[in-house]
Structure formats: C-alpha cells, structure tokens
Amino acid sequence: MDATLLEAASQIENPLLSEFKQKGGKVIGYPCSHVPEEVIEAAGMLPFRLRGIQTRSTSIGDTYFGPFVCSCPKALLQNAGRGRFHFLNGVIMVQACDSMRRLDECWRKAGNDFPGIVPDFFHYFGVPHKVTDYSIAWFADEIRKLAAALEKQFQVTITNEDLSRAIEETNETRRLLLRLEEIRRRPDTPVTGTEAMSLILAKTALPKKEYNKLLSKELKKLEKKSNPKNVGRLRVVLAGSVLDDVSLISLIEAEGALVVADTVCFGARAYRGEIPPGEDPYVTLARRYLNEQFCPRMFGYSKQRLALITDRFEAGNADGIIFQNIRFCDLHGSENGLFEGRLDKVGTPTMRIEREYGTMADEGRIRMRVAAFLETIKKRKNAA
Amino acid sequence: MIFAGCDVGSLTSKAVVLSGNRILGSAVIRSRTMPEETARKVMDEALAKAGLSMKDVKGFGGTGYGRDKIGFVNHVNSEIACHARGARWLVPNARTVIDIGGQDCKAMRLAEDGSITKFLANDKCAAGTGRFLEVMAKALGVPIEELGKLSARAKKPVCLASTCTVWAQADVVSYLNAGETIEDLGAGINNAMANRVATLANSVKPDRDVCMTGGVAKNQGVVRALEKLLGYSIVIPRKADPQLAGAIGAALLAAEAV
Amino acid sequence: MRSELKEYGFIWSVHSLLSLGAKVANGTPKEVQKLLNSVPHFRDLLEAFLAYGEPGRLFLVGFARYMEMILNAHKEGKKLCFTTFCQSPAILHAMGVVPVVLEVVTVAGTLMRGSAIGEYMDVCLEAGFTETSCSSQRGSMGAFLAGLADKPDFVLINTPGICDTNANSFAFAASYFDIPFYQLNYPPTLTEERSRQYHRADFKNLIAFLEEQTGTKLDLDRLRNIMAEIQKQDEIICELQEMQRLIPSPVPGIYNLFIYALRFTLGGLPECTELLTSMLAMAKKNAAEGKSGLSGGEEKKRALFVYIDHYAANLPLFKFLDSRGIAHLGGILDRFYQEAAFYSQGQGYSFKTATLDEMIDSLAMQNSRLPMVKQIRGPYDAPEMWLEEVKNLAELTQPDFTLYSGTPGCRNTWGMVKLLVSDLEKAGYPTHVINSDAFDDRVESWTATAQRLEEFLELRGLA
Amino acid sequence: MPVAGIDVGSLTAKAVIVENGEILGSAVVPGSPRPGESATLALGKALENAGVKREAITYIVGTGYGRKQIGNVNEVHSEIACHARGAYQRLPSVRTVIDIGGQDAKAARIAEGGAVARYAYNDKCASGTGRFLEVMAEALEKPIETLGDLALSASGSVRISNQCVVFAETEVISLVNKGIELGSIIRGLHEALAGRVAALARSIGVEKEVCFTGGVAKNKGVAKALEDALGVPLRFLDLDPQITGAYGAALLAEEATMQKKSA
Ligand SMILES: Nc1ncnc2c1ncn2[C@@H]1O[C@H](COP(=O)(O)OP(=O)(O)O)[C@@H](O)[C@H]1O
Ligand SMILES: Nc1ncnc2c1ncn2[C@@H]1O[C@H](COP(=O)(O)OP(=O)(O)O)[C@@H](O)[C@H]1O
Ligand code: SF4
Ligand code: SF4
Ligand code: SF4
C-alpha cells in the first residue's frame, strides 16, 4: 500500500502536511465528524481531524478533565499538552458529546500551564441535536459564523464558488471511499479491514487533492486484485465509539476474522452522504452534516442508526457485528446494549466490548473476548 | 486412554488427568509469571497424584492466558470453549454457565449440543471478580476459603460500594473502624459480588440448568446470594472441584480431537 | 433483582409509604411514635421532614398526590409522559398529561425504598443501558423497564438538559419502549435573537406534538390559569430565596429539596402553592424572631451548592450540615431565573399571557432558563454560564464555602469541575468536591463521604 | 517531655516519639483489621526503639484512616494536616506536599507558616496508590522494595492503558505472557502511577518546593517518574518518608502541650 497514505494513517504528522505548512499553508484542527471540513478547504486551508494516537498516558488530560470521562478527549488534550499539535494554526471546538465539548475549556485552561498550546484561532462550534427546518437554518447560520471567523482571523475571503469547489472535492473523496467499501464487500476482497481503515484514516490528515489522487491510484490497483484466501473467512462489522487507529481492527483480524465494514466515527461516518449541488452551499452543508445521524449524540434517531448497521451487515454479507464503546461513553455504550438486544432477537450474532481509548489498550482481555465471539459464530456458520 | 488438560489462569493454574470419565489426579497452584514453568509444575503435581508420568498421557490440552506458550501441550483451545466443555461434563444438562475466575466473570448460554450461543464477560469495574473477594478477605483478615461462610452467620449485612474493588476496600476499612462485625461485612462483600454477577447472568437470558464454575463457585455466600437474586437454584458441580472446569474441558477437547 | 421486589408496583409502594407518612404527620405525637416504630427504614426520613412541622407534612401530602396522579393516570384516561426535571410541567398539565419526572421519582424512590432503587438501576444494566450513566434517571427508569409501573406513552425532554447522559437515557427509554420521543433542543447561547427564535419554533413544534399525542387541542384558558398559578408560585419562591440571603438564613435547608421536588412535578397546581405558602410563613416567622432555619438555632457557617443540592442517597448530609450549624443556601439547581429573582441580572423571564404567541414565548423563555438548561449549555466560563452564575450567587448569598455534589454519570460537570473549583478557590471560596453519587449509595458509602467532609471543614478552618 | 504521634494507615501503622521537635524513636508495623491493636503495637515498638516508658508520654495525637479507633489518644488530626506539618518542620520552604500511601494519594499546597491552603485526593479510582504497586508486585512475584530499581534499570517501558488496578493486573499478566521484558512492564506501571499522581498534583497547582512523602516515596522509580511527569525536582525529608504523618502528629501533640502550658 502507498507509503504516504500509511504514514498519514499511523502518525500525527506526515510529510505532505509538513510540506503544506512549509509552503505557508494553514492547518485547522477539529475533533468531530459534525464539522463541515469543506469550509476550511474553501478557505484554502487544511482541515486536520484531531487524533489521540501516540499518547502513552492521559496524565495531562486527567489534570483538567474529571474522572468518569471518556479517555478520547483526554488523549487529545494529552497530545495538545505535549505539543504534538504544534503545526495547528487554529482549532474548532465542537459541542459534540459532553466529554468532547469540555475539551474546549480544558484545552484553554491547560494553556496556562503549558504555554503556546492554544492556537490564536480557537472557535466554539455549536451543533443542534435534532434535524428540523429551523435547526438546519440555525446550523447553516453557525457555519456562516465559522466561515466569517476564519475570514477575519486569516484575512481570506470564502466565496460560494470556493465552497462549491470544496464540496465537489470532498464529494469526490466520498465517492472514492464508497468504491473502497464496494471492494471490501467482495468475498475474495484483496483488502483487509486494517488496510481499509488506514486508507480512510489518511483522509483526515492530508490535503484533499493529493489524497484523492493517491487513493484513486490505490483503488485502481485493488479493483483489479483479488485474494482467494479471504473467501470463506469470517466477516464482521464494527460499530460504536470513535476509533482513530487500526489496532483494534488488526487485533480482530489477527484472530482470523475480516472486518468488512464499520459505522464508527473516523470510519464510515467520514464519507457517507454526498452533497447535491444547488442553492445556498451553507444550507446544503448544514443539511448534510445534521442529516447523517450516525452518532447517538443525535438523540431520537436510533432506528435510523440500527438500520444503517444492519444494512452494512447485509451488504457486506457479514457473520457478526462487534459493538465497542469507550469506557464512560454512555451514548454509544447504551445504544450498543439496545441494538445487541434487538439483533439477538432476530438471531444476528453480536458482541459488545467496553474498552479504554488508545492503541492496543488492554489487549489480553479484549483478545480473549474476540476469540470467544469468533468461535461461536464459526460454529454457527459451519452448522448452517 | 489417558488425557490431561491444564488451564493457566490469570491467578491460579489447574491441571487434571482424565481416563475416560474418571479424574485420576488434579492440582491447583498459584500462577507464576512464567506460564510454561507454571504449566509444568501444576501438571507434574496432577500426574504425581495420579501416579503417572508425562509419557503415560496420550494428549495434552491447554488453555488460559499464555496457552500457546506451553511446550508439552498439543491441543490448544480458548478458555470459553474449555470452560463450556468442562461445565457440560460436570453438569451434563447445563444450559447456562456462570464462570467467576480471578480476573473476570463470564456468563455463557449453551445450546442442546453444548455449543455456545451467547457469551458475556464483565468489562466494568473489577467488583465482579474473584480478585475482588481476595482483596476483601485480606482486608477482613480471613482466609478466602472462610469468606463464604461468613454470610450464614451475618445479622444485618452492610450495603457496600459495589463499583470499585479498591474503594470498596477503603469502605471496608472505615466500616471496620466504625465497628461493624466481620460477619456483616463479609456478607456485604459476598452480596456486592452476587449483585454484579446477577446482572451479568440475567443479560444472557439464562436457561436451566444454570451451573457455576470457577473458584468463586466454592464461595457459598456468593452462591446463595446469587440464587436469591436470580430466583432459581444454581447447580454446583459435585463431580469435581468447580475450579477445574477449564482444565477438564481442555483434557476432553484433547481427547475428542484424537 | 430480588423476587420480593418484583411483587409490588414501584409507584404504588412509594405512594403508599408517602401517604402513610402524611397520615403519621396528622396524628397525635403518641400515634406518630407508634407508627414510626412500625416503619424503621422510613423513620429517620419522616423525622427529618416532620421536624419542619406543617411544611414537612404538606410536602408528604403533595408528593403523595403526585404519585397518585401517576398511579391513576391510565385509569383516568390520561397520558403518561417520561420527562426530565429541567422541563417545566406547565404545558403538560395544561394538556392534561401526567409528567413522570424520572429524576424526582428516583429521589422519591431512594427516600422511600432505600436500597431497592439500586436493584432497579441494575435492571437498566440488564436491559443494555450503561451503568456509568446518570443514576438520577436509572433508578426509577429501572422500575419502569422491569414493568413495575405503567408503561409511559411518550417521552419529552430538553437537551442539553442536565447533560448528554440525561438526554441519552430518555432516548434509550423511548427506543426501548418504542414510544414517540420529543426533544426540546437548545443552542449553546441563551440570549441571542437566533436562540430565541429557535426556542420559539421548537416550543411551537412541541405543542403540535402534544396535541397529536393526546388528540386534544391546547386549551388556552387552562394554560393561562396554570401560568397564573406558576406566577404566584414564582413570587413565593423568589421571596423565599431572597430570605436565604439574610444572615442568619431563616430558611431550613430541606426546603431546597421541597422546592425542587414539587416545582418540577406539581408546578402550576394548587398543592404546590399551598406548600410554598406554608414554607414562606415558617421562614418569615424565623426571620421575624431573627432565628436561623437550623434546628440548633445558631448559624455558624453558610454553604452554597454549585451543583446537586437535593441528594437523596446521602440524605444524612442535611443532618450533617444542620447539626454543625451550617446553613444550606441551596444552589444553582433551584434557581429558575424569574425576572424578579435577586440573581437574575436581566436574564430573567416573565409571563405574558394575552395571546398564544405570548404564552409560547413566555414558556419557551422559562424553559430555556431552567436549572442546567441555562448554565450548562455552553462553555462553563462563557457569559451567563456556570462560573459566572455561581460567582454571582456567591456574592449575593455570602457562603463561607461551596460544595460540589453530583453523580459520576454527569460527564458535563465532571468534564470541568476541576476547573470550576480552581476558579472558585481563586475567588476566595473554599470548595469541596463530594465524590459520592447523589442517588446511588453504592458508589461511596456515607461514612466515607462524611469523613472527607469533616476533614475538609477541619483543614480549611470551617469547623 | 516526650510526646507521641500515631498514624494508622490503610496498610501500615506508624508511631513516632518526639521531644522538642527531635525524633527519639519510631516504628512501622503492618496494619491489621483492628486498627486499635496495630496502633498499640506500633507505639510499643516506637517506645522500645526510643527507650522511653509509656508513662513518660504526656500527649498523643492520632491520624490516618484508623484514627478514630485508636484508644486513649488525646486528639486526632487528618493525615493531610500531619504530613504537611511534618514536611514543613523539616523543610520550611516546602509549598507542595505529595503523599502516596497505600490506600490513596494526596497532594496539598502549603501556605507560609505551614497551614494547608488547598488539597486533593486521587480520583475515585485506585490506580494512583501504593496498593496499585503492591498488587502488581504480587502478580510479578517481586518484593515491593525492589520494584523501583527494576524500573530505573529497565531499557524501555510499555504503556499500561487500563487504570483499573484489577484490570491493569490482567493486562500485566498478559504482557508477561507475551514475553515482554519485566523491567519495561514495571517501568510502565511506575509511569502510569506517576501520571495519575501528577495529574492530581497539577489540579491544585504545583508550587516549589515539592516534597514527596508516604510509603511510596521510598520507591525511587516512582520518584523519578513523578519528577519527569511534573517537570520539577522532588525534595525528600531527612527521615523515613513513611513516618512523616506520625511525625507531624507528634509535632502537633507537642504544640498542644505548649498551648496547655501557656494557658
Ligand atoms: N476455596 C475457595 N473458597 C472460596 N473462593 C475461592 C476458593 N478458592 C479460590 N477461590 C476464589 O476463586 C478465585 C480464583 O478462581 P480461578 O477460577 O482459579 O481464577 P482464574 O481461572 O482466573 O485463575 C479466587 O480469586 C478466589 O476468589
Ligand atoms: N520499602 C519500600 N519500597 C517501596 N515501596 C514501599 C516500601 N515500603 C512501603 N512501600 C509502599 O508504601 C505503601 C504503604 O505506604 P503507607 O504510607 O504506609 O500507606 P498507609 O499510610 O495508607 O498505610 C505500600 O503500598 C507500598 O507500595
Ligand atoms: S462520536 Fe459523534 S460526537 Fe463524538 S466525535 Fe464522533 S461524531 Fe462527533
Ligand atoms: S467516544 Fe463517546 S464519550 Fe467519547 S468522545 Fe466519542 S461520543 Fe463522546
Ligand atoms: S474504580 Fe476501582 S474497580 Fe473501578 S476501575 Fe477504578 S480501580 Fe478499578
């Protein structure tokens, strides 16, 4: 697989990003799939999805966050505190879930103890929890405010043409990643879930143009290839809390299964829902970023989410679904529980694990559970 | 034909030597950091009890942490598979198995043929583990074997913080300081444990017979409290020490593989 | 869950205990003693309430009445609505819907049923709901999931509400029961015009939703009457809270629990007005005699709560403070931001009831200012949010120290409580974070909590 | 006239005999479910070690978890007050005291004059405590005393992700079984613990001088990791850090007798 993509997927910083910086480009960080990255693109800047990888502890995070809080935002703050986000020119804080939105305050306060970690541009971005005409109108307005703030801070102008161009570019990315999903669905798919996740992750740290180029090259290759060894291999779908590195997927695949699809943040959430051209780009953006109700922080849409998961399950003709949530993530945790119950009733094999955020967190325990689950579904498959 | 199984558990390691349906010898020792070494030690003990030596054994089954590191083992299976198999041997018509070990607590639902249809393990705070009981027993100054008996003698069990082992221990200390009796505290501890296990058990929608394996099955206090919470009786293996379930399963699977 | 528990209806049992308590309060001292002996667990609690004479009794009566409403709703052909405490019941009462305020019902359950509530919480876990979620919903929700109370007909909440976990548990209940779900939603700012429009539009939708669910049209006069009643109640509450500023404060600490419990359940109904009136009378009497609301009479210190102040699991905290001569000044959870309230600083609401639009506007304004809806929607240090509000309250009520008490389930407050504490310390208010769970005594035993509190008072020279 | 301080902790009981601020003798004994007994035991040993008779002791101050249970003490104070007092006596420039004991970790900021300004306990999770290392020492079959050096001499260190003591133990066991070098696992454990405690200390604001007390302060590995995590040098008292609390208690006892005299 392409080295640049792999590096972008596994490292916080990557050569293309550094190059972009050297050429005087500006990088804006954001923590949540509800942020319309197109706006940043349109401003000629690089949208960078904040990640908690490469942390060894959450000591800095724990200084400001209380206990009982998801370790994902803590890991993000850890990286910020350690200066690993030094290349950021700005950050957009999102009222995503409560753990994530408190990153705003905690990061700012950490700035007093760790000078220089708070970029000048530090923007709080609101996201409604429901989809109605007036919430879309409000959100469109919130996006306009974001654009205005960027224009003011960086002395740029964002025209509707810029936006439409950025939207088209991101749509292209979405189309490409959907092709990847198609490839993963093939019984003799040449690509493992681990590789696929890497390809998807790379998107969050690369300039779109380059990314689209590299990705379509990869896809052309993959579409020609096939891997008979994967025929008949157990196939699982991964759902639940945010996942920004491949370790969990590779653990599952090391136990013999193939992860053929997901609905996690960073994963499928990042490329669903192409944006149709037309009317006011702010409104179309608002509609897209509210309407993709993947995340349980959009309350009252669990039916849609379950439908999405089962759709992935069937389309990928998978044998089971693995639900995972980060400890203290009630949003995904309780919905996982709900769905597990529902799917049990219709006989879809599921498993639920709770984990700490982070690379290879708690390998032993999780491997034991995954192995047990795969054993049970293998028995079923053979019986059938 | 003679088969042996060993289960290198997180806390203890167990070995059994089986001839058909008879246990010739068995052993339970504390796990050491070197699984290979531990496995040998416990297996040698079991063989010694059976008056046999390695060469008399047709096949060795192994399971547990570091199972693939054990040289002499020639049939490796996952803990779940072994515990389920062992439980079925101990309690032939078991449909639900609750296994409480040192480091986790598992609940499994089995189909007629003994294959696992649903499996859950405790992911939350460590209150639902045997370790929890050990830490508490230590705080109370009673041997782990005695902890279970306390429940029977308790007058009014205390309600204990059931979320965290170590904080529950802090609570135990302050209760002791507040002059609560060892019995009432012991009962409180067993109940807290039972509460956690009950929710886990209920989440797999248990069918009869429900049987319990793992070391904690030897804790009467927990078992009784659990029965009260679940509202039906739990079968405790008589055929052999419930702590051996994993090892027995390993031996049987080895035998069946041949 | 123990099989005994499965045999009695949850609401039924709480209701019977409450009405028993109310009867006890009516009886002669001798009868009281006899009955008290027959209900041991309940004893301390009744004593705690009855220590406050008439208001205590009226509280039990009112609370029993509320449980009765839930108990009989379906018999009387009324709809049951799961809702949250940061949601004004006015509109529901106006539509003849009975609100099941999960948090308040949990409080009632914890008070009346003690450890049972913990087992209901475990039912949620079995249903797949995370046990790390806020216990204030899990307690009573578990009883409903277990089928120990009538199934609700629909769910109405408002996000951000107290926090995601709050909204999330209601969303879970709705999906679990497969019943309709409506959320009022709030943007992260309060007083911007576009926020006002949002509130308005959202509330209009809500009425349409309720009319659909109940199959009845909103009766304007009925709504008007209820709003008039609420106005009365608001005036009394303002006066009571104004009195908490007096040194010594003539308002007994437990009144905060009373206000909280009835404001969200019977707000707009006469029972609530009656109780508030008698509370006000009692407080005025104390004030006239220059007495504090403490049973010991003398006020040594004053404590302000920066979060939950109506703990139920650790009800002994009321006693703890009272016995040490520490006045309980309430906290942000019972501040409603009426225009007339001493802390409102122009952010308050007032009722206009001439036209429907005026009423909707007023209710939307009120709702968007309810505890935690107002101050937790945005960054804690943003204008009009948590920090500003607590500091403002502290300046006005002059506490010697402040206390955080919450539930581990509240990401929202645990996400920044450390920052808030530092700011309050800088502002000169010693602040203690209570680690226990206000609704689940299994998280930290009261003995442990009390030890930490004593230590705090000793070390910070507040003993 | 000699006075005594007794600190009945969660895992150990300590006693110190003091006269005019100087330590005449001290003792550390393992705790027992009956705090009263371990207190008496510790006191007896300390008296023996000081060569002082019980009758000679004019005043006793108790502290620690079991303080309420110690028989015939004249008054009790919280551990934090005692650790602060003890540290301040030996090191007047101290502004922050970090005490890691068996059951919990505490950080306290000290004002001019030795009064406690602010303090905090470890979060409601045991991973920041001495017990954490003890459990791990058991699992790894290494004496607790040796952990520190093993950590210091390790070539690398692995990340221990799970904060839960019991689950961290599982994690450690599976790491061992994966054949990871013991040293780097132990180093990882020390860093995990130090990380938690550093977070705790920072949350109340760390001011120099920073003094490290409590039994865990004997563990040089933790000290090193903590210094790295906090980025400030740690100061140690010229006495067994484990007895700091008892020592402070004794000093408070002496003050009390002074006041009695002057009154
Ligand atoms: N004789 C006994 N009586 C009561 N409980 C026991 C006894 N022996 C072991 N236990 C419990 O069993 C646990 C160990 O169970 P085990 O199944 O061996 O764990 P693992 O398989 O994970 O090593 C101990 O933590 C202890 O709580
Ligand atoms: N010689 C030693 N080397 C390293 N650590 C030690 C040593 N002695 C004690 N400890 C640590 O100190 C802890 C007990 O400290 P202590 O202050 O006595 O706790 P407490 O006051 O709560 O009883 C033990 O958990 C252990 O981790
Ligand atoms: S999980 Fe949801 S709220 Fe959290 S980052 Fe992803 S999309 Fe945003
Ligand atoms: S995992 Fe859950 S709690 Fe954590 S940031 Fe995402 S939504 Fe929030
Ligand atoms: S609270 Fe206790 S049991 Fe829970 S994770 Fe922390 S140490 Fe483990």
Image (cartoon, coloured by chain):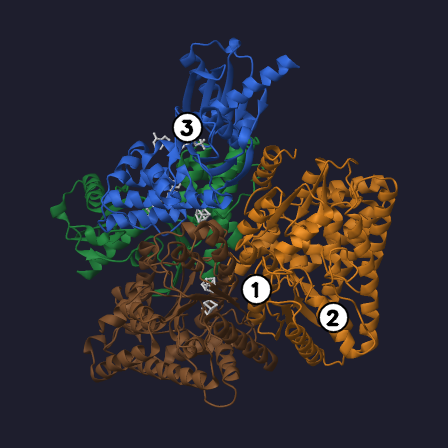
Q: In the rendered image, which residue does mark 1 sit on?
A: C169
According to the colouring, which chain is orange? C
- What hue represents chain B? green
Where B258 sits versus D109, above or below? below
Give the drawing colour for chain D. blue
- Cα–Cα gap, marks 1 and 3: 46 Å
Q: Colour of chain A?
A: brown
Residue pictured at 59% horizontal, 82% vertical: A133
Q: Residue furthest front?
A: A155
Residue A320: horizontal and vertical position, in percent? 36, 71
Q: Assign a secondary structure to mark 1.
A: helix
Left or right: residue A97 versus residue C74 is: left
Same chain for the residues under marks 1 and 3 in the image: no
Query: Label 3 to label 2, Cα distance in Å?
Result: 61 Å
The residue mark sitting in front, 2 or 1, is 2
Determine which residue is flagged by label 3: D242
* Lower position in the chain sequence, tag 2 or tag 1: 1
| Residue receiving disc 2 | C363
Q: Dot 2: within a 10 Å radius of its alpha carbon, few (fewer than 14), some, or many (20 or more) residues?
A: many
